[in-house]
Image (cartoon, coloured by chain):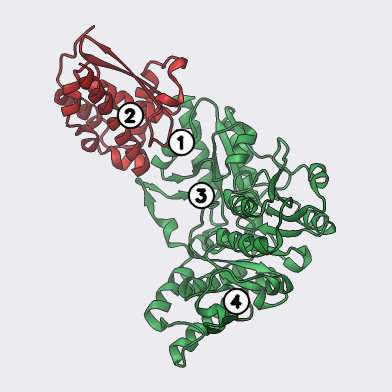
Chain colours: A green, B red
Amino acid sequence: MIDVEQLRKEFPILSTEVNGHQLTYFDNGATNQKPKVVIDALEEYYKEYNSNVHRGAHTLADKATGAFEETRTLLQKFINAAKSEEIIFTSGTTEGINLVAQTYGRANLSQGDEILVSTMEHHSNIVPWQLIAAEKGATVRPIPISDKGEIIFEEFEKMLSDKVKVVAVVHASNALGTVNPVEKIIEKAHAFGAKVLIDGAQSAAHLPIDVQKLDCDFFVTSAHKMFGPTGMGFLYGKENILNDMPPYMGGGEMIKEVSFDGTSFNTLPYKFEAGTPNIADTIAFGKAIEFINKWGKEEMAAHEAALLKYATEKLKKEVPTAKIIGEAENKVCVLSFIIENIHNYDVGMMLDARGIAVRTGHHCTQPLMARYGLEGTIRASFSAYNTFEEVDRFIEGLVRIVKMFG
Amino acid sequence: MTVATKNIEEVQNEIIDDFDLLDGDRESTIFYIMELGQELPKLDEQYMIDENLIKGCQSKVWLTTDFQEGRIIYSADSNTDITKGLISLLIRVLNNRTPQEIINADLFFFEKIGMNGVIGSQRSNGFASMIKQMKFYALAYSAKS
């Protein structure tokens, strides 16, 4: 087991106070806190070697390029991609999905085709597909889920046909915590010739990711949910598929040669990285990966699982008017619930008064909330730096709220 | 119909005094607002329709009015107790007033009780939308009367 007290020391924000109380941060599903190594990397870059990458013939440019590309190599190893060229830097999960929809989708979808997404998708894995589907005459179809919050696999299998060109599913649900059986989904979808995109926003920092073993065609995630900076992420794609895809944005790094007679495009990964990239954040993202590697993803996940179990049992026992939404067998560390007769927002605000940060609302999964007939939920999402004492504080807060207003 | 005996400024000062007793404690302040919300009579379901929703509020807030003897009677409801508490404060200040009084009202209590900091910017914007809608009704009635 990890030494949580030692781990906490790496995060400056965790020793701060909010509204006169020690911060208890349970909104890790939205973004998690950053260790000092990541924060320092940003400062160091701007203070010591701020320079553009790939083009300069000077020492600073060389140093910046080296650090920038180092992140790509770290990510390749992190998800076991066959080549570092298969890692495309993006602004995050959302850009990754839009990139695939606008390039692969535009080139390969046509009238009558189908894109399957699950009912539990984040809007970012629904809307980009709706946009391209509307343009190409394709349809986006939701895969149904059970009351427990799991994909109904038999229904998914029934939906598969030669018309299905893309299956885009979340690896772990941000609103329910459900871990989807992506390996099985990929295998079944491939049998019908469909390409599969995995949204790894909630999984990359918590679950083992081996894209070769999974055999997914695309994998997208965001740095800020992996202890890294916001506005940063990456898209993994199989080399042959990425090579066949048309470019996304034009300009800068993505060109090989430009003339008014025509333009040729750079090789992977630069073909998809137009303009000056987010250099500082990319470098800092690398530090976040090293941080996860240092502490061990498995060890951190084991602690998170223990926290989730503890919090779930305690909530059930001490807050009987709470109803947990999402009780899948296999979950990441997300505890989503509602409390009878008290509005989610009100609970969130009252917890905040005690320095406890949770998320309330629809979590950008409105179709999922509609599935449960809810406006939203209260969501506590844990990270490896959270403690059992913090869970106690959180449950105490809820008990108090229910006592006053339930 | 009882006519408000205190003017708008006096009622606002009364609210400021009430909140002073809470000594700036955030949790007690929120509890107090929620209590106010729970005390506000429920709006008849027939009025809880989309046309009566105040635009710009994060939570749902329904507002209806009645015009009696030259004065406006406001009724409101919300799906959250905090928001209901907030609008109950506005009703306390503006109910049973003439349209002109409402149009001219300088509503200073919200800032004075430090509510912006307690409820956050989104809900503060919602509160501003409530005021706007209440004044809008006053304008409409003043044009009619």
- Residue at image point 62% right, 55% down: A132
Q: Furthest residue to the front? A: A261
Q: Are marks 4 and 3 on the same chain?
A: yes
Q: Residues within 10 Å of mark 2 (few under 14, many from 20)?
A: many
In the image, residue A186 above or below residue A405: below
Residue where numbered disc 3 is placed: A27
Which mark is first along the chain, 1 or 4?
4
Q: Furthest residue to the right? A: A191
The quadrant the N terminus of chain A occupies is bottom right
Quarter of the image for residue A292 reads bottom right
Residue where numbered disc 1 is placed: A345
Q: Residues within 10 Å of mark 1 (few under 14, many from 20)?
A: many
User: In whole angstroms, how far apart are the C-alphas of marks 4 and 3?
Assistant: 35 Å
Q: Residues within 10 Å of mark 4 (few under 14, many from 20)?
A: many
Number of marks in the rendered image:
4
Q: Secondary structure at mark 4?
A: helix
Viewer-nearest of labels 4 and 3? Answer: 4
Which subunit holds the residue at mark 2? Answer: B
The label on residue B86 is 2
Which subunit holds the residue at mark 3? Answer: A
The reply to whether dot 4 and dot 1 touch (C-beta < 8 Å) is no
